Image (cartoon, rainbow, N blue to C red):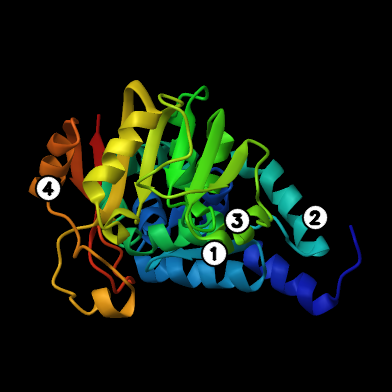
Amino acid sequence: MTTTSPSTLLDSLSALNDIARLRVLRLLAQHELSVGEIADILQLPQSTVSRHLKMLLETEFVARRTVGTTGLYRVSDSMPSGASDLWSIAEENFGELPSTDADNARLVSALTHRQSDSKNFFKNVSGGWESMRAEMFGSHFTSIALLSLLDPSLSILDIGCGIGNASSLIAPFVSAVAGVDRESAMLDVAQKRPDLAPNIEFVQGDASKLPFENGRFDVSMFCLVLHHVEDAESALREASRVTTSGGRILIVDMQEHLHDEYKHTMGHVHLGFSKSDIETLAKASGLTLLHYHNLQPDTRASGPSLFAALVG
């Protein structure tokens, strides 16, 4: 056995010198469990189980993580060397513990109940579930991963591309992307993006007179652009011209709002668009509104709610 201090060795031996704690460890070697689940399986009061877990935590035989307001316990994967040696001996002799068959049956029952009644199991977890997932993986992976559903052969036109945010986001999932903007300063920044993909081209041009031939693109999109365009009808006609027959035009913009100050502070021409506004624009441009979705607002955002519309 690896050398360890006498006091640590005695503490570790003391932690394992109890049938109930060994039964707890045997359960946690199989599944991560909450205090309540352990108490139900061992048919012990939660206070007793909590006391046993406290000693096992202090001697580092188990580890705990918190999800929401729920503590979940498991056998530690980073025990001190002395504790690890004792754990190996204990684990080899779990078959000699009393009540193992009953513990096994109740463990299966607890896990089955967890699956069939996940609302109850996660009622204290759900509050922190999204934050835990965001901490591990970030907050944007779902929407980005869903872009994989796009047809990889598509060619996309990003009208009013600015510094190329939308173009760069979609480029890895399609064949080619062209970004067009009337402001050369914006395009200069777009060309120098560190994430600039090889299948993106940026071109200077106006939304009402696009520098592309008829039917070049499968999809054209306006991302928070149309409210800046004086003649939105002409812009839609141009987008339709450069989009192949049967292609689609995506509009992401602000829902109709009352922030008149945007006209003066940010140069907005239109105070958002209602569904009927988009229907009217589409019809006047020889197009049809296919879908219109109000997007769920971000509670951290201060601007008007957004919509996504598909016309063709």
Q: Which is nearer the N-term, disc 2 or disc 3?
A: 2
Instruction: Look at mark 4 in the image and give the residue it sits on.
Output: 275
Q: Which one is earlier in the sequence, the residue at label 2 or at label 1?
A: 1
Instruction: Report how far apart the C-alphas of labels 2 and 1 lie in the structure.
Output: 21 Å
- Name the quadrant of the N terminus: bottom right
Q: Secondary structure at mark 1?
A: strand
Instruction: Mark 3 or mark 1: name the one nearer the start of the chain.
Output: 1
Residue drawn where x is 49% and y is 47% of the image: 180
Sequence-first tag of 4 and 1 = 1
Mark 1 lies on residue: 64
**Mark 2 vs mark 3, CA separation in Å:** 59 Å
Coordinates of residue 246 in the picture (x, y in percent): 31, 20
Residue neighbourhood size for the residue with mark 4, other residues' Cα within 10 Å, grouped as few (<14), some (14–19), many (≥20): some
The type of residue carrying mark 4 is Lys
Element assignment for label 4: helix
- Circle 3 residue: 190
User: Which is more foreground, mark 3 or mark 1?
Assistant: 3
Looking at the rendered structure, the kind of residue marked 3 is Ala
- Tell which circle, 4 or 3, labels the residue nearer the N-terminal end: 3
Pick the residue in front: 203 or 60: 203
4 or 1: mark nearer the eye: 4
Q: Is residue 97 visible in this depiction of the protein?
A: no
- Between marks 2 and 1 in the image, the one whose residue lies nearer the viewer: 1
Quarter that holds the C terminus = top left
**Residue at the far top in the pictured view:** 245
Q: Between 128 and 164, which is closer to the camera in this rendering?
A: 164
Q: Which quadrant would residue 281 be assigned to in this image? A: top left
Which residue type does callout 2 highlight?
A: Asp
Image side of residue 27 versus residue 121, left or right: right
Tag 2, which secondary structure? helix
